[in-house]
């Protein structure tokens, strides 16, 4: 009889533990941007960029309407970036650079791939609505950018357009994205052929590249709401707000001015964070 009671009690604990757990999958689109200070006197802007996310999750219900949920996600977070105004361009001549003052027009899209680990508290407000709030930690695995730069300097009739193909973790100082020859320009009494596709650190001296532009981690707050179409299938909306400066200030250059006395970059101390929305379709079972 005692054995039977023990077996029944253990079985009851197992069943209750299983019923308190749920697993799920979630996938959808991201609409994100960088947020941070901008240079004055020029038209510089961050705007919304799209990406996607997908992953799995686990939730444990510790009360009737409350649970703790952990997720493992692959997610693309980034921003569109534009710049139009007074600037400079470092033209490579041999093992050195020649600074040219002029005007730059830049259009870029940055897409940074992360492995993200959100942990949230869930409140089942009704059969249809569930609210969540918590934190996330993300680890950068694939930061990339693509765009163009148009530079013009009226005094010497210097102008050209160049493609920007950036792999922020792999590109080296002075590196090019492809071996294709780009525009040829006449400067300092010489004809210089630029790269057609410039890498992330094409205009950097080796001594100016101290790490990569984007940090390997992000951390922030997250919260949202889910609407359940039926018991398992739902549509969710989440908002993420980064608490970490995602850019390395030792590599993040100012575009408007440079150190003319020492012919070097000036670096930014701006705090740039990730912000954005996730729209998801999910299934819980």
Image (cartoon, rainbow, N blue to C red):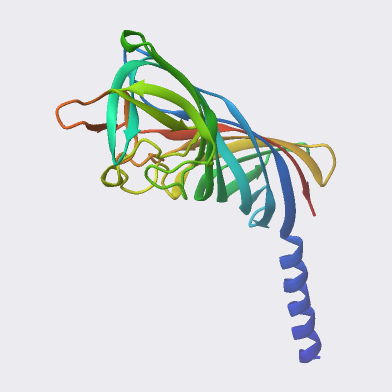
Residue plotted at (38% across, 42% down): 174
**Residue 31 position in % (x across, y down):** 61, 30
Q: Nearer the viewer, residue 220 or 175?
A: 175
Q: Quadrant of the N terminus?
A: bottom right
**Residue 81 position in % (x across, y down):** 49, 25
Residue projecting furthest to the right? 230
**In the picture provided, is 130 more to the left or to the right than 100?**
right
Q: Nearer the viewer, residue 93 or 161?
A: 93
Residue plotted at (40% across, 33% down): 272
Picture layout, residue 87 above or below residue 283: above
Q: Is residue 21 visible?
A: yes
Q: Is residue 109 visible?
A: no
Q: Nearer the viewer, residue 7 or 43?
A: 43
**In the picture provided, is 205 more to the left or to the right than 273?**
left
Residue plotted at (51% across, 46% down): 135
Picture layout, residue 203 above or below residue 21: above
Residue projecting furthest to the left? 261
Q: Nearer the viewer, residue 135 or 264?
A: 264
Residue projecting furthest to the top? 154
Name which quarter of the figure residue 78 lies in.
Answer: top right
**In the picture provided, is 208 more to the left or to the right than 110?**
left
**Residue 44 position in % (x across, y down):** 42, 18
State the count of labels.
0
Residue plotted at (65% across, 54% down): 63
**Residue 112 position in % (x across, y down):** 54, 41
Q: Quadrant of the C terminus?
A: bottom right
């Amino acid at each position: 009889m005692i054995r039977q009671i023990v077996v029944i009690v253990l079985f009851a604990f197992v069943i209750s533990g299983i019923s308190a757990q749920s697993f799920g999958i979630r996938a959808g689109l991201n609409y994100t941007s960088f947020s941070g200070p901008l240079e004055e006197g020029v038209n510089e802007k961050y705007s919304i960029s799209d990406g996607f996310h997908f992953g799995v999750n686990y939730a444990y219900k510790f009360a009737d309407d409350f649970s703790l949920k952990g997720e493992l996600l692959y997610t693309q977070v980034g921003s569109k970036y534009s710049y139009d105004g007074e600037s400079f361009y470092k033209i490579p001549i041999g093992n050195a650079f020649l600074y040219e003052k002029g005007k730059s027009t830049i259009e870029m899209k940055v897409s940074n791939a992360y492995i993200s680990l959100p942990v949230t508290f869930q409140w089942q407000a009704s059969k249809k609505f569930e609210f969540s709030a918590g934190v996330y930690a993300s680890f950068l695995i694939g930061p990339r950018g693509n765009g163009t730069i148009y530079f013009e300097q009226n005094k010497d009739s210097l102008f050209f357009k160049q493609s920007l193909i950036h792999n922020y973790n792999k590109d080296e100082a002075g590196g090019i994205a492809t071996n294709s020859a780009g525009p040829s320009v006449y400067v300092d009494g010489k004809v210089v052929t630029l790269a057609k596709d410039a890498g992330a650190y094409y205009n950097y001296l080796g001594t100016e590249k101290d790490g990569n532009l984007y940090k390997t981690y992000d951390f922030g707050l997250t919260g949202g709401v889910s609407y359940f179409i039926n018991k398992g299938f739902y549509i969710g909306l989440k908002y993420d707000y980064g608490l970490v400066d995602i850019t390395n200030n030792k590599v993040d250059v100012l575009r408007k001015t440079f150190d003319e006395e020492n012919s070097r970059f000036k670096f930014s101390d701006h705090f740039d964070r990730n912000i954005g929305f996730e729209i998801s379709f999910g299934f819980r079972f």
